[in-house]
């Protein structure tokens, strides 16, 4: 099994340095691969990355929500979206994303497509 980074990822970078097997990578170019990704062949499912993510974007593969209910105000980040996000990452560097959308409170979104996106990144 593996852990999966979903489209709630806003490239904060916090997970990268805690992974004991260094299997997390930023997607590049970001317009095509907007989030970070976990190499499923290397991930040892230790879970160390999960609490590091300020956006709660990382899930064990079999727990990626098909019906994620938004608190409101959080972003999803995926190709095809055109919203603008600007923030500061874990290292204090500026992050600008143009593939986002703000979720409304109570809105339900399927995060499972991130599983396929992650697989495709490593093809
Ligand atoms: S800590 Fe969360 S937001 Fe940051 S890169 Fe990792 S998964 Fe993405
Ligand atoms: S679960 Fe562990 S091995 Fe897998 S990506 Fe997260 S920190 Fe790395």
Image (cartoon, rainbow, N blue to C red):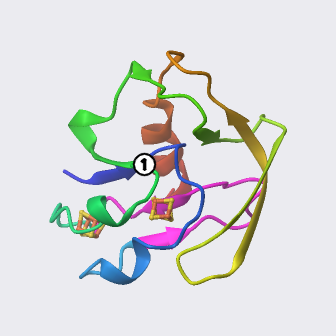
Q: Is residue 105 left or right of residue 62?
A: right
Total labels: the figure holds 1
Q: Is residue 37 magenta?
A: yes
The picture places residue 50, in percent across and down from the top left corner, at 29, 59
The picture places residue 66, in percent across and down from the top left corner, at 38, 21
Query: In the rendered view, would you say 27 is above or below 35?
Result: below
Q: Is residue 27 magenta?
A: yes
Q: Is residue 101 left or right of residue 60?
A: right
Q: Nearer the viewer, residue 115 or 60?
A: 60
Query: In the rendered view, would you say 1 is above or below 49?
Result: above
Residue at 36% in and 73% down: 23
Q: Nearer the viewer, residue 86 or 67?
A: 86
The picture places residue 45, in percent across and down from the top left corner, at 17, 60
Cβ(mark 1) to ligand 1 < 8 Å? Answer: yes
Secondary structure beneath dot 1 equals loop
Provide the residue span drawn in magenta: 24-42
The picture places residue 72, in percent across and down from the top left corner, at 55, 28
Q: Which residue is mark 1?
A: 57
Residue at 47% in and 28% down: 71
Query: In the rendered view, would you say 103 is above or below 120?
Result: above
Q: Nearer the viewer, residue 15 or 3?
A: 15
The secondary structure that most of the magenta stretch takes on is loop
Residue at 32% in and 35% down: 64
Could you classify mark 1 by the number of other residues whose Cα lies within 10 Å: few (under 14), some (14-19), or many (20 or more)?
Answer: many
Q: Is residue 77 left or right of residue 2?
A: right
Residue at 42% in and 40% down: 115
Query: In the rendered view, would you say 81 is above or below 40?
Result: above
């Amino acid at each position: 099994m593996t852990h999966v980074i979903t489209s709630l990822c806003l490239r904060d970078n916090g997970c990268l340095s805690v992974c004991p097997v260094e299997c997390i990578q930023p997607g590049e170019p970001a317009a095509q691969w907007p989030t970070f990704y976990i190499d499923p062949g290397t991930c040892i499912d230790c879970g160390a990355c999960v609490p590091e993510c300020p956006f709660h974007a990382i899930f064990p593969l079999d727990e990626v929500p098909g019906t994620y209910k938004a608190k409101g105000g959080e972003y999803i980040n995926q190709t095809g979206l055109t919203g603008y996000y600007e923030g500061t990452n874990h290292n204090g560097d500026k992050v600008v994303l143009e593939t986002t959308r703000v979720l409304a409170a109570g809105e339900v979104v399927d995060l499972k497509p991130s599983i396929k996106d992650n697989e495709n990144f490593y093809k």
